[in-house]
Image (cartoon, grey):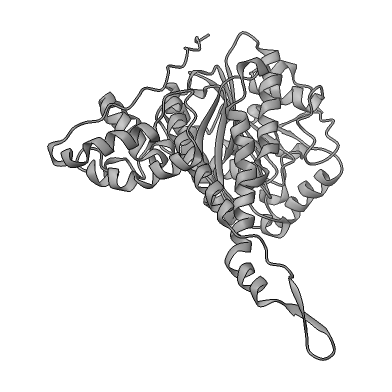
């Protein structure tokens, strides 16, 4: 078993002093200290927002020494890692501080680095949204005013002006901040809670319905790693429920292998369908599958190879469709994971478990009652499974796990057989799985 090293403190940035930037040197160093504060230092939202506003000037000043174009774009995870490993510590500090969003999204580099960068992105974003929301004026009253001799009612002009200028943005900001509060709560959860340290591996509030990748425990040093892909209607504002599912998975796996390191990851890095009609389309999976494949490759690179951690991809609902399509990405790229679990799956875009590239004995599926039946059978009807076959069909050829889930979202209740069976697969204890 690999040991779990103590995570080092975030270093203070060591800035260069290029002759061309001498005139702004004092401001350069001062703002960077705001942008990358020492651990435990509480930075006020206004201070953080003011510091973030100066980042562009710092990027321009440091361009010759830490240019954005030097960061790999569209490269393999191995090339990303090679670039990062070839930098000095000073250069790494500068890139991570000046371009945190780019570094935080770079598959293949250490999770501790990505986490530091994404926490900076997260804090700056939250500060900006809090300030913007506070600056929106209250909704004008009255909303309706009388019109005409018969006493009809129409929207007041003041309300219409406010509605067109502010209402949609206000709703967005409130939704983003609701989800961000859930993420922040997880990031700040103390060790006494019984959960491991969290790692923020991706964050972007404004891309589609948001993008979040958050790990319980460091995947780089995990003996067992599970990546959970959520389905239809997933959005940043409601991410708390998905984070709770990976919390439950970690707690269950930790019971099964208490002396090993486990990481469970919420992977929401695709544009999930917003409703059932949209979920009948393949385009969301086609767009998300390459991103999932890249993330899995990057995790393997950061871990040190395919044999350093037992990995599982778990797709729920439309997330299983994304996972199935990801197995078909990249000729000769190797298996997506060691095991694949499809939960409440409407289909995986393949006809047989053996088509998923991990061996049919490493493909697992479970269904539930209530609306889960409708989701699965609806997926069959719209053709999400080749030959109208879905993973819970015996003809699919995978392992059908026993499930006591009462509906489509009931698979992660502590103490239930459904959760235990998922944990057994994640920890490689296949003989402990109860089959249906």
| Residue 184 appears anywhere in the view | yes
Taking the view exactly as shown, the residue that stands out farthest to the left is 19
Rendered position, 82 above or below 28: above
In this rendered view, identify the residue nearer to me: 140 or 333. 140
In this rendered view, identify the residue nearer to me: 208 or 315. 208
In the image, 11: left or right of 386? left
Quadrant in which residue 151 is drawn: bottom right
In this rendered view, identify the residue nearer to me: 34 or 230. 34
Taking the view exactly as shown, the residue that stands out farthest to the bottom is 149
Taking the view exactly as shown, the residue that stands out farthest to the front is 141
Q: Residue at x 85, y 89 (%)?
A: 150
The total of numbered circles placed on residues is: 0
Q: Residue at x 47, y 12 (%)?
A: 5
In the image, 83: left or right of 123? left
Rendered position, 78 above or below 387: above
Rendered position, 415 above or below 176: above
| Residue 424 appears anywhere in the view | no
Q: Where is residue 87 shown, x and y percent of the image?
A: 26, 28
Q: Where is residue 407 shown, x and y percent of the image?
A: 83, 40
Task: Name the quadrant of the C terminus.
Answer: top right
Q: Residue at x 75, y 26 (%)?
A: 419
In the image, 402: left or right of 173? right
Q: Where is residue 353 shown, x and y percent of the image?
A: 65, 36
Q: Where is residue 334 shown, x and y percent of the image?
A: 47, 32
Q: Residue at x 70, y 38 (%)?
A: 241
């Amino acid at each position: 078993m690999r040991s779990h090293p103590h995570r080092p403190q975030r270093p203070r940035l060591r800035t260069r002093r290029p002759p061309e930037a001498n005139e702004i040197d004092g401001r350069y160093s001062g703002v960077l200290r705001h942008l990358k504060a020492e651990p435990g230092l509480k930075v006020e939202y206004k201070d953080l927002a003011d510091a973030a506003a100066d980042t562009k000037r710092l990027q321009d000043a440091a361009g010759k020494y830490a240019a954005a174009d030097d960061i790999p774009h569209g490269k393999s995870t191995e090339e990303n890692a090679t670039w990062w490993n070839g930098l000095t510590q000073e250069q790494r500090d500068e890139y991570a501080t000046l371009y945190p969003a780019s570094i935080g999204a770079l598959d293949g580099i250490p999770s501790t680095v990505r986490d530091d960068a994404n926490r900076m992105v997260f804090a700056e974003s939250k500060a900006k949204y809090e300030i913007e929301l506070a600056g929106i004026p209250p909704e004008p009253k009255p909303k309706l005013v009388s019109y005409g001799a018969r006493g009809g009612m129409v929207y007041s002009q003041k309300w219409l002006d406010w509605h067109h200028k502010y209402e949609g943005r206000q709703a967005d900001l409130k939704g983003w901040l609701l989800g961000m509060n859930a993420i922040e709560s997880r990031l700040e959860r103390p060790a006494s809670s019984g959960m491991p340290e969290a790692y923020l591996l991706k964050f972007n509030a404004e891309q589609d319905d948001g993008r979040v990748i958050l790990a319980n425990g460091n995947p780089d040093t995990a003996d067992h790693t599970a990546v959970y892909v959520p389905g239809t209607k997933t959005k940043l504002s409601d991410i708390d429920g998905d984070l709770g599912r990976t919390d439950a998975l970690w707690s269950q796996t930790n019971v099964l292998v208490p002396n090993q390191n486990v990481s469970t990851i919420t992977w929401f890095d695709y544009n999930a369908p917003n409703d059932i009609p949209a979920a009948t389309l393949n385009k969301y999976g086609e767009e998300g599958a390459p991103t999932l494949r890249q993330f899995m490759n990057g995790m393997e690179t950061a871990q040190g190879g395919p044999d350093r951690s037992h990995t599982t991809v778990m797709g729920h609902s439309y997330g299983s469709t994304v996972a199935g399509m990801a197995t078909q990405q990249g000729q000769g790229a190797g298996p997506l994971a060691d095991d694949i679990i499809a939960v409440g799956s409407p289909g995986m875009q393949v006809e047989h478990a053996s088509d998923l590239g991990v061996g049919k004995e490493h493909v697992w599926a479970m269904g539930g009652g209530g609306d889960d039946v409708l989701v699965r059978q609806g997926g069959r009807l719209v053709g999400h499974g080749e030959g109208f076959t879905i993973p819970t069909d015996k003809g699919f050829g995978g392992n059908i796990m026993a499930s006591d889930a009462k509906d489509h979202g009931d698979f992660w209740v502590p103490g239930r057989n459904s959760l235990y069976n998922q944990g057994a697969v994640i920890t490689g204890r296949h003989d402990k799985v109860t089959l249906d």
